[in-house]
Each structure stands twice: as C-alpha cells, then as structure tokens.
Amino acid sequence: MEFTNHLPHPSSSIRLFFHMLRTTIFGEEKGSPNLEDYDVDPASGFFPPTPLPRLTGEFEHWESALDDAEGCLSLGEDTRAAAKARRVNGEVWRYRIRSFPVLDTTELKNDIRRVQRAHMVLAFLVNFYAHSYPPLEACTPIHIPACLAMPLVQVSQFLGMAPVLTFADTVLWNAIPTNPALPLSANNMSLVHTFTNTETERGFHMMSARAELRGVEMLRIIDSYVHGPNVTDLHSISKTTKDLIRLAAVVQDFTEIIQSIRNSVDPYQLFWDVRPWFRGSGSDPASPKWIYDGVVDSDKLDLDGPSAGQSTVMHALDVFLDVDHKLQQKRSPGPSEENRRADKGFMERMRRYMPGSHQRYLADLAKIPTPVRTLAMDSVVVREAYDSAVLALKGFRDTHIRVVCLYIVSMSTSTPPGTVEESQEREKARVRNKSGPIRGTGGNEVSTLLKAGRDATSRTLLSKK
C-alpha cells in the first residue's frame, strides 16, 4: 500500500479542514467527560469496582426475604409434583412480604452503591413474588404489593432506570470476586443471587459477565479515541487503525464467549426452569400484567424483563461503529421487508433499563465531533481496519442467532418437563396462552429482531465485496 493511502482522500479534505477549524475555535473535543464521570471503572468497566454492600438497618428485612426465597420457591407455572408441593412455601413467603411496611429510601439517595443494591434486591423480590404465583385466570393481573413496588420505583428514579429486574441486576451488580483478595476476572467470579441455584442459570449469566469484562478493553479503545487531541493527524490515524484491529480481536473474543454457553448451560433446563423467572410484565402478551400497588400510572412503567439487549457494552460498540438499527441512514444493500418489520425502536427502548449514568455515556458517545466511521470514509487504511471490526461484529451476531435458535426457538417446541400427566397439563396451558412469534425475556420477537441487527451490521461496512 502506498504511503498516500494513509492520508485523507482529497475529496474529503474540505470536510476535515472545517472539522479541525471548528475544534480549534470552539474546543469541541476538549473537556470531554472521563469514564468515571459515567460510573464506568477503568478496570472493571460497567461492573462496580467493589461488591455492593448488603443493606442494613430497616432495609435488612428485604435482604432476609431474598435469602428465604432463594432455593425455597418454585415457579407457579411448574406443574411437577415437587413444584406443587412447594407452593405452600410461596404462599407463606408472599404473605410475609405483604406484611412489610412501605419504606422511604431517601436516605440511600447519596450512596450510589446502596441504591444499586436496593434496586437489585427489590427487583429480585418482585420477580420471586410474581412468578411463584400459581396460574391465574386469564387476564387476571398480579398485584405487586406497595411495600416492594413503591421503594423500587423510588430507587429507580434515583438511578434513572426502569423499576424492574434488569441486566444490571442479574449480571453487573450480581457478580463478585470469588476470592475477595483478587480483582474480578473471568476466573475469579461468582454470582450472589439466582432464582434456581442451578449451574445452568449461573452459566448463563457468567457468559454475559465474561463478555462484559472482555469489553473493558473496548471501552478503553473508545475512550482513547474520544479524548484524542486531533483524530485526523497522521499519528492519530495510525493509532486509530491499530486500535480498530484490537477492537476486532475483542469482538472475536465475544463470539468465542457466547459459543462457550454449550459448556455450562443446558438448553432444555434454561428454557423451562430458568428463563420463566426472568420474564417481566408485558414481555409475553399471554402472561399476566403486573400492577404496582401504590404507584400512580403503574401501567405506564417499563416492566419488560432483563435482556442481553440491555448490555451497555454492546450498545457502546454499535454507537462507536455507527450501526444503524433504526434504518435512518441510506446504506447498501437496502433493508429487506423482514428487516423493516422488526422492532426498530428495540435498542433505544432497552437503554431505559440501563442505569442513567450509562445511558448518558451512550448519548454523549453518539455526539463526538468526528465519528470513527466518518474518519474511516476518509482514509483507506482506517477503512480496512474499521471494516474488520464491523465484520467481527457481524460474525458475533451470526453466532448469536445460532445460539438463540438452539436455546429458545428449538426449545419452544419441546415437551415440558415432568411425568406424562404433568407435561400434558403444562402443555395445555402453554398452547392456550401461546400467541404470536417466540419472544425474548425483554419482550422482543427473537428471530426477526436478531436478523435485523445482523443485517444492519452488514450495511455498516464501507467496502462492499
């Protein structure tokens, strides 16, 4: 490759000149917030730098209620004899919950870690409460008692996020170092809370946690680009090229991590025994709606379940590479009819389930004066490295589709667990309630959405082959 190919194309020189002039005069690239300003740790990324402290004082009874729920409650929809025998535990536990007072959480407001802990504990309690109920009559809502609903809404307002179980609760705030003397790592990590205490549930969340940790290098690459003094000079172009190659390697590792799910996660057990606990209100049209007692306009709350679509790492990757999920840019090839039918607002809606500080990080990242895709359009060498990162992301999404087909789509036609009679009972309920396509725990139509995301990634490529 000739040296001149490292330089911006002449056709782009005017745009780059005005960019440099604008930043010189107005200083648009100076004073950008650091990662810490968004509650992002340079070493642990979106994970808190230390485990969240257990709540004490008047909030301790939330903690003890969660301790009592784990391993003692069964899914209300589980028709196996052993599960039915444990329903009395659920009745007693829910009765105890309803006796709790409604607590004001204002005193937690100035301690971000205690507020995050309160959100996680209350959100787990809400899902334990809702999903331990035996099947209700059609269209009968589940009332979440005010003692859980009102403080959960309050701490969610402090955090600027949805008042329901989220990816942050099940993964980011739930993972701690197995050995407290060592930092959090893929080999030094365990979960604090689960619904089923199974290796399948732990393995499922650990897969996401390992990807989040691997994404810390990605966040550093992005941060380095955002804070570059002048991304268009020769030195910066060379550095950005190398960083994009590094970014492609990080994304390839994401693919290997998601493929490792087969080592620890049983598809059948995940679909029937674990995944139902994650569902929120409205994530399945046939599931009971939740009413948050004591909360005004409860029906307007964001109450879908946790989803990998709420991972800020993956959103940051899309924003940095400028993947157009909303089909707002004219790119080639044009979207298919199936792409157009997909929920184009899904990714934006999932942001509401992230902590507010992480939402702000994504919003500000989208506003950087010179997006890396724009820079790549102006330099062949950057373009090649940029496309390698985009291709790696497409490969990740291809693999994600295959994993979802195995773990969700194919399992949706499997026979429920239990004896013949128990399976038939659960199957009848499933057929009676089934409506429309297979949906994820975040409420999305799985196949259509994932294919649309993969195709949007393909359209991000600059060099069409």
Image (tube, rainbow, N blue to C red):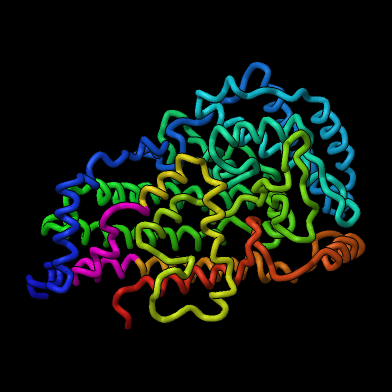
Q: Position of residue 30 (x, y in %)?
A: 22, 42
Q: Quadrant of residue 125?
A: top right
In terms of depth relative to the viewer, which is nearer, 327 or 312? 327
Q: Position of residue 453 (x, y in %)?
A: 49, 68
Q: Residue at x 19, y 52 (%)?
A: 22
Q: Magenta stretch: residue 138 in it? A: no
Q: Magenta stretch: residue 377 in it? A: yes
Q: Magenta-highlighted stretch: main secondary structure? A: helix
Q: Which residues are magenta?
A: 366-389
From where the camera sits, is residue 308 visible? no
Looking at the rendered structure, the number of numbered marks drawn on it comes to: 0
Left or right placement of residue 257 versus residue 21 in this view = right
Residue extending furthest toward the top: 57
Q: Residue at x 35, y 57 (%)?
A: 320
Q: Quadrant of residue 422?
A: bottom right
Residue extending furthest toward the bottom: 465
Q: Residue at x 45, y 40 (%)?
A: 357
